[in-house]
Every structure is written in C-alpha cells, then in structure tokens.
Image: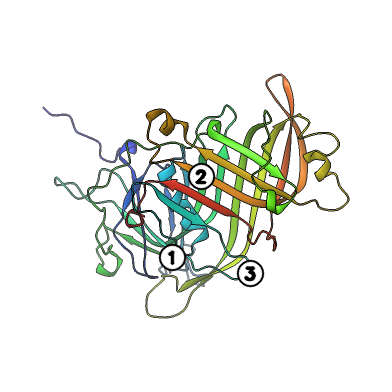
Amino acid sequence: MSPVATPGLVRLRKHQFGRQADFNTPVAAKRAYPFSGVPTIDLAWTDPEADMGSVDLIAAPTRGPEELTASLNVPALYYNDLPLLHAAIFGDDQDASGAGAAKTWVWQPASLTADDLDLFTYEFGDDLDGTGGKPNDWFQLGDGLLESLTFNGPEGLGALTADGSWRFGMARYEGASEAALQPSPAVPTSGLSVDSAGIPVYLGDAVLSIDSAFGDIGETPITDALHSFSLAITHGVDLKRHANGNGFDLSGYTRTARILEWQLVFSKTADIVGVGSESDAWFSETAIKRFVQLEFTSSAVAEAGSPDIPYSWRLRSPLRYYTREDGEVGGNTTITLIGRSYYDASLGYVLNSSVVNTLATASL
C-alpha cells in the first residue's frame, strides 16, 4: 500500500515576481526569489449592524475594501535580487545598462518631484499547482509595491538580510470558480527556479566612508569601527478607490512623505568619539551635515577570477544624526548613531544607489 501524501509542503512554497507595464494588468512572473513569509489576503467580509429579529446572524455579510499585503523576509541578500527591491520601493522604471554580462542599475529617487511607481505581479503557492491531478492553490497579487524596506548588515560580517512590507492592489485565486476572480495570465508561471549560483552581499566586503563636504563623498574611509548597520526606507502610500466597474481592485496609488533612516553601530575609535568625531557632530547645537558612502565589492568574484563581472553595490547619501545609543558587542562598548537622509541641493539627491550584477532588464 502506498503512503498517503499530505499535500501542501512548506519547503515547496515559491515567491515569483514580474514587473508590470500597466496598472491593473498582471503579468507572468519573470523570476523566483529566495524569500520567506506569506501574503495576507483580507477580503474584509463584514456582518451588517442591523436589527434582524434574531439573536443570531441572518443577513449575509458584505465585502469591503480589501487589505492585500505581504511581509516578506530576505534571509540572505544576493546582488541579483537588489533590482526587485529597489524598483518596488523607489520606482522610476529603471533599466539595466551594459552590453556584456555585467549590468549596471542606478536609482537616484527624486525629491522635488514624485517618481512614477514600479508595480509588480506576485505569484505565491506551493506544490498544489494543478498538475498530476492535484488541485491548484496559487494566488496572483497584482499592482504590488513596497511600502517599507529595511536592509540589515549583521554583526559578524555575514550576508546582509532584508525585510519588506508589500502592498497590492488586486488579488486573483487559481482555485476560484468565478472567472473574473481567476488569474490572467494563469499561475504559477512554469520553469522558474531560484538562482542556485547567486553572489551574496557580505558586510565583510563593505567599506564605509563619512565626509564633511559633498564634493569629498567617498574619500574618507572609517576603519576598524563599523560592526553592523541598517537602512530603513519607508514611504506613505495613499490608496485610491474609484467606482470604475472593476470590483474591489484599487484604482491607483499616490506617494506621500518618504523617510530613510540609518543605524550605524560603531566601536569607540577616534573617528567615532571625541572632538571632531561623529559623536561630536551629533552633539552639536546645530545639525551637522555628513556625507556617507557604503560600498560593497564582492570578494567571492575576485577570488573566482572574474573581473569582467565585478558584483558591487554603492550607496551614497547626505545624513544628519538624531540619536546616539550606548551598547556592547562581546567585551567592548559600542555606540549606535541613528540618522536620517535628507535632500541636499549641492549633492543633488537624497540617495544614490548603484548596483552591478548580471540581471538583465528582461528578467525583472
């Protein structure tokens, strides 16, 4: 007798994304990502507050504005995964440049105007994919973007991680009996697998520089000091709902304020404490401008002897400190300086993020 297999294996869950060309128009996924987490699909079924001549419910519930979200974790960040995260948080329809294997992606989000949003279709499911006589239990969530994104560089110099809060404007279900609620194109998109040879972004490959003048950004390395860091990016999104005959699907989004907050955990070196240090800049009676560059260059590629594909990621941003916190790592005391990026007219941006990898635009 054959054993009865229990369907729906956790390790067979998949997260697949594809960048959309138009609002309310889902696309087939282009790539599978090594993420963890599940979507939350709240259809807002609500009982009417009515007198029904009964102590129990009688009238049917009604649906309201859907809440379609997903808190997804990136347990290990790879260079080829960075474009999805950048595009979903910043938008502006960026493409990769470079005719060879190496591709360069650059995001410099506008501050004085609002960049267009990049929207994504998200496919989520497991081994129940309609094949081999199995039922189908896959979701297609469209018009997706990131409301918040945090990059984390860990103590110990290992691979970076990330956490993202996704928002979606429409939901379809492959198991739905109503045609209007079924995915189009059908899900899951076949033939997609997580990259088995991805190059991780390691904190051990990073160099931090902090300068006092915008023209010197990247010229003054801070050595033997940085233990760990985080960069949290959040922006408000106003959800637009109009009666256009498209059910509960969103009609559009509007950006609101954006905040980029850095947390830098340091040893107590002369660059960090004392007169003329970063702590001195924090303790000033007026906000002192700092110009930060954090650059990662993959040592794994250098060791493999592939200089034609220099996997790298460079972040540049003007910064002002707000908070200092004291802590410890092992037997040594540390301080954490918390600051926020701002738009600097001389520098011309709030953030410039440049990624070199091998992901072509067609794969986003």
Element under label 1?
A: loop
Residue at 30%, 52% in the rendered image: 138
Check disc 3: other Cα within 10 Å, few if <14, some if 14-19, many if 20+: few
Q: Of the residues tagged 1 and 3, which is closer to the observer?
A: 3
Q: Circle 1 sits on which residue?
A: 169
Position in image of residue 246 (x %, y %) = 37, 75
Residue at 44%, 70% in the rendered image: 250
Looking at the picture, which amino acid does disc 2 mark? Trp
Q: Earlier in the sequence, mark 2 or mark 3?
A: 3
Residue 112 tag number: 3
- Alpha carbon separation for disc pair 2 and 3: 25 Å
Position in image of residue 100 (x %, y %) = 33, 49
Look at the image and tell me whether residue 46 can be seen: no
Vertical placement of residue 243 versus 165, above or below: below
Q: Circle 2 sits on which residue?
A: 313
Check disc 2: other Cα within 10 Å, few if <14, some if 14-19, many if 20+: many
Position in image of residue 210 (x %, y %) = 69, 43
Q: Of the residues tagged 2 and 1, which is closer to the observer?
A: 2
Q: Earlier in the sequence, mark 2 or mark 1?
A: 1
CB atoms of marks 2 and 3 within 8 Å? no
